[in-house]
Image (cartoon, rainbow, N blue to C red):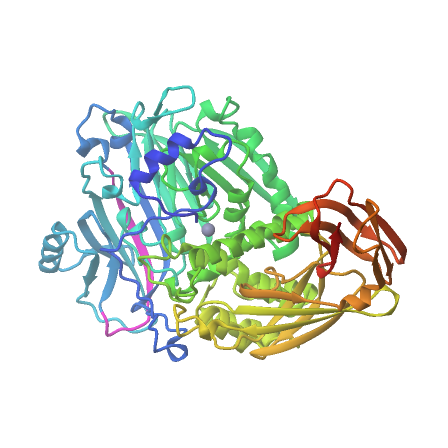
Amino acid sequence: MIKPIILLFLAFAIGNAYSQELPEYLRAETKQFDTENTTSGTHYHKNNRVQDYGDVEKRSYDVLNYDLYLDLSTALNSNLEEDTFFRKYFKGYNKITFKITDENVPFEFDAVNLNIRTLLLIESNNIIPISLNELDTLFDKFSINIAVLNFYSNKNYTNGDIVEILIGFDSKAEDDKDFWRNRGMHIYHKGYDVGNKDRFGNSVIVEHNIAYSMSEPELARYWMPCNDRPYDKAKSSITMAVPLGYTTASNGILDTRYVRNDGVSDFKIQKWVNNEPITTYLMNFAASVFDTLHQTYIKNGDTIPSTHYFWPEDRDDIYFTAVKSMETHPGMMDILVDNYGTYPFATYGTVSVFPFPYGGMEHQTMVTQNRYWLNDEQDAGFVHEMGHHWFGNSMTCATWADIWINEGGASYTEAIYLESLQGEQSYRNVIERQVREVLKRNSDNSAIPVYAIPLSSFFNTNAYLIYDKGSIIHNQMRLNLGDEQFFRVLKEILEDFRYQSVTTAEYKAAWESKAENPLVDIDTFFDQWVYNPGYPEYDINTRVDILEDNKFAIRATLIQMQDQNTAANPDVTKVFTTPVRFKLYKDEKNYELSEIFVNKEKNQTFYLENDFFPVKVEIDPVSVLHNTFSSVITSVQLEDYVGDLELYPNPSTDGFSQLNMNIKNTVQNANIELIDLIGNKVQSIYNGRLNPSSIGYKIFTNGLAKGIYIVNINLDGINTSKKLIVQ
Ligand SMILES: [Zn+2]
């Protein structure tokens, strides 16, 4: 999904949302998480790497199916004047079907901020309450809002048994002044003032009653009891009860809808069925007064129906233009299918909600996105969420330690999309921006690895590592394998892990088993970039020599200096083994890229030939994430450029002197000036390109004060000077 902001920042950000350039958080992803009620372990321990990789703490069962029923009618029938309790009230039950995998361990489910009202065991269509004593205890436990529902059944189970339970629950609504108090489940009412003004000076208010969920990373447990860990995928259905006039959106397809009367009023029942495996953090729903836009994506004979949900006001308004904003979606799907292989799911869709403190969230087949994305400028966000359907939704991080695969892959998708649409330079621009972001946020090279970032920081202070560095890692893998092989292997991996979860160790092993002749072996690659922190820091010394026929020999010496950086994380690899390309600048702006070299020594010299004199030589940041410690370009001798240099008469007595020289090779940038002894320019004599020839310049001296001057000759950075006496 896309990046975290706190409520204070929300107020600021929405105020700016109307300006030309949307605030960063609306373009980027944002997620919020709860540091109190998280249970999923991550295994990062600085001194305990490698051997722990790949551990997934699994529970004693495997969920096969969730059938969730949610009654949202009380909340949606309320208005702003009602008590919080009614406005935020929801109730439901979740029927969970699971297979026992460890018969000796009690079943443990996640539920936060919910009152558990019933807990029933369903056997052969008989419903058996779990021992009442235990249930009483459970109620007690839940009344103090524990995070984990943990119970034994008095039945004896053996591994492989399939069990069905039904958990009835309702909400513990609290004051909604604090957005995060009811996290996971968000319910707002028409007229609710978000607390800011739009560009017309109007208050930003909610247009229609709305209920929607937010699930990543561990927020689904706030609106349904579940096994809230990313590795455990199941099938699912979500059935919602909403007032007449409301429309629902959720994962999969809208399967059943009918109107029911509960004795007081009519309400709608809508059931969404999701037939592909899904993990809880990707489940979602939304209900409001929505308009819809239908699209069909057709690729290689596959038809993917897509529905976008938004408020009717936003269909084609001044600022919110849902129809126009969504126009790019079919083309995006085309490009992603070309690059990543078949789309893994039966449908696609988005639901635009507000207020939403994030940009977008890749809920499976039903992306939840900020209403502010309907401004026809959010393709980067759209394609990021669509890219998640391969990276994250189909192939899912097995633990939160592996989240960099999700976000790195989705962020890399932004570059892939623009490359297919606009060409290589646009791709490079995205990667260069991501490199700048990493260097800005980790300027002293002190950061932690992208692998196993704690849950408390991977969507805020360390988000740039999973998003930007995660993308850069995929880009560098591409250079490591070459385009053809990279995309072939990537497609195979996405296919192999379709509907599965993946650990970083498994991801690495997949690349390792499929990659042939990578420039850098995959083990080293992952160790440097994934399991260890940081990047190389280079001293670059370049020498350029002129060869025959206007060819230039370039010797670039790279010295890896990161071990000299006392601020750097000591785990930063001492000597990176990495492909590098050089940027050879023709002038300040324009450059050509060299061929690819492999840097594997602390101090290593690379030889290349070029047909122009480079005014600057840099390591291409798109070839390797790095910082440059220092960069020196020493160069050809003056004698290689110029001969027969003479200046006469000297002293200058007749009002002028003559500068003659023989230019031997083309000079791209010649600058010849007369300066005084303290360095002030007195005259510009010549500025521009010089072709091989004999040339002469007159230097007029009759207006000059008597004294000593210097004729300064700079030819492609090589300086020489002659003293000129004026009498
Ligand atoms: Zn994302």
Quarter assignment of residue 245: top left
Q: Main secondary structure of the magenta part?
A: strand
On whether residue 263 falls in the magenta region, the answer is no
| Residue 100 included in the magenta stretch of the image | yes
Pick the residue in front: 389 or 481.
Answer: 481
| Figure check: 395 above or below 541 | above
Where residue 215 appears, x then y in whole percent?
Answer: 35, 49
- Start-end of magenta stretch: 90-105
Q: Position of residue 640 (x, y in %)?
A: 81, 68
Horizontally, residue 354 falls left or right of residue 437, namely left
Query: In terms of image quadrants, where is residue 560?
Result: bottom right
Residue 43 visible at all: yes
Q: Is residue 24 above or below residue 718?
A: above
Can residue 394 be seen in the rendering of this structure?
no
From the top left corner, tell me how far across and down residue 263 is, in percent.
23, 27
Residue under the point 37% across and 53% down: 459
| Lateral position of residue 416 relative to residue 372, left or right | right
Relative height, residue 169 to residue 243 (above, below): below
In the depicted view, which residue is nearer to us: 205 or 134? 205
**430, above or below 396, in the image:** above
Q: Residue at x 21, y 59 (%)?
A: 148
* Residue 344 on image: x %, y %: 55, 54
Please count the marks in the image. Answer: 0
- In the displayed structure image, the side of residue 252 where residue 284 appears, left or right: left
Kindly identify the residue that appears in the image at 26 percent across and 39 percent down: 179
